[in-house]
Structure formats: C-alpha cells, structure tokens
Image (cartoon, rainbow, N blue to C red):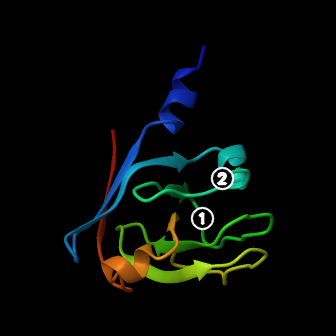
C-alpha cells in the first residue's frame, strides 16, 4: 500500500500556458523525490501528446540513456519560462539555469506547436 507521501508524488498534473492560452499537459506527473527526480523519463519508450513530467527543484537536465527527443521548459518560482530546450536529443546535457526552480519535460515539438517563449507564464495544477 502506498504511503501518503508516495501518493502526493503520484498526483496527475495539468499544465496550462496562460500567456498563449494553450494546454501543454493534460495528464502528466510530478517528480519530487530524490529517486523520481533522478529517474525522470529514463526507461520510458515515448512521451505521448498531452503527457509531461515536472521535475521539482531542478535547474539542469540531461538526456543520457534516453530513447527519444523531448522538449523542456525551465520555470522560475512564479511559473515563468526562463529558458527552454526544444527537441533535446539523447546523450546531451543542458546548461545550468540559475533562476530555474523546476523543469517541465514535454513531447518533442510541443514548444514549436504552441509557440512557447521565455517569459510565458504557466499554471501548474495537481489534481
């Protein structure tokens, strides 16, 4: 049986770009624990449209061991995009973004599709 702490980390996530009035994630998840943050998307075969992973307390990411490219939005404490990486390929390391508090990983092409830019404000809702 899962503990209350484990259930807290498994709550579904919805991400809305308030600036662009577009949905980024309909059924994502949040990584808050040491292990879930370290694992990230490793071991998954794809990231379907509408899915995503929010990595809390994160200012840089890597794609070592990944099997597919993905997009990443780096967010500050207020939920504003402070940096992004579009179509991050396998075996790469992002730069360290000092003002980042979290990173939202998305299916490749999402940033281009919705026109996300630095300065956009996101609303993140855990259900």
The residue singled out by tag 1 in the image is 58
Q: Residue at x 60, y 57 (%)?
A: 46
Total number of numbered discs in the rendering:
2
Q: Is mark 2 on a helix, strand or loop?
A: helix
Q: In this view, does 10 lie above or below 20?
A: above
Nearest to the observer: residue 8 or residue 88: 88
| Quarter assignment of residue 35 | top right
Mark seen at residue 94: none
118 sits to left or right of 73: left
Q: Dot 1, how many residues are within 10 Å of its Cα: few (below 14), some (14-19), or many (20+)?
A: many
Q: Give the percent coordinates (x, y) of residue 103.
A: 53, 66
Q: Residue at x 60, y 64 (%)?
A: 58
Nearest to the observer: residue 50 or residue 6: 50
Q: What element carries label 1?
A: loop
Asked if the residue at tag 1 contacts the one at tag 2, i.e. Cβ–Cβ closer than 8 Å, the answer is: yes
What quarter of the picture does the C terminus occupy? top left
Specify the farthest residue to the left: 21
Q: Residue at x 73, y 64 (%)?
A: 67
Q: Dot 2, how many residues are within 10 Å of its Cα: few (below 14), some (14-19), or many (20+)?
A: some
Give the mark, 2 or 1, whose residue is nearer the N terminus: 2
What quarter of the picture does the N terminus occupy? top right
Q: In this view, does 64 lie above or below 42?
A: below
Disc 2 to disc 1, how far (Cα)?
A: 8 Å
Q: Give the percent coordinates (x, y) of residue 53.
A: 52, 55
Q: Residue at x 42, y 73 (%)?
A: 110
Q: Is residue 119 above or below residue 41?
A: below
| Quarter assignment of residue 97 | bottom right
16 sits to left or right of 117: left
Mark seen at residue 37: 2
| Quarter assignment of residue 47 | bottom right
């Amino acid at each position: 049986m899962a503990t209350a702490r484990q259930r807290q980390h498994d709550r579904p996530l919805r991400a809305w770009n308030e600036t662009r009035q577009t949905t980024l994630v309909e059924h994502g998840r949040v990584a808050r624990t040491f292990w879930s943050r370290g694992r990230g998307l490793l071991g998954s075969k794809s990231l379907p449209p509408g899915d995503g992973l929010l990595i809390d307390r994160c200012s840089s990411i890597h794609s070592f061991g990944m099997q597919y490219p993905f997009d990443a939005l780096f967010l500050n404490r207020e939920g504003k995009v402070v940096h992004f990486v579009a179509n991050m390929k396998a075996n790469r390391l992002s730069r360290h973004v000092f003002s980042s508090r979290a990173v939202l990983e998305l299916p490749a092409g999402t940033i281009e599709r919705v026109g996300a830019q630095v300065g956009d404000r996101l609303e993140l809702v855990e259900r």
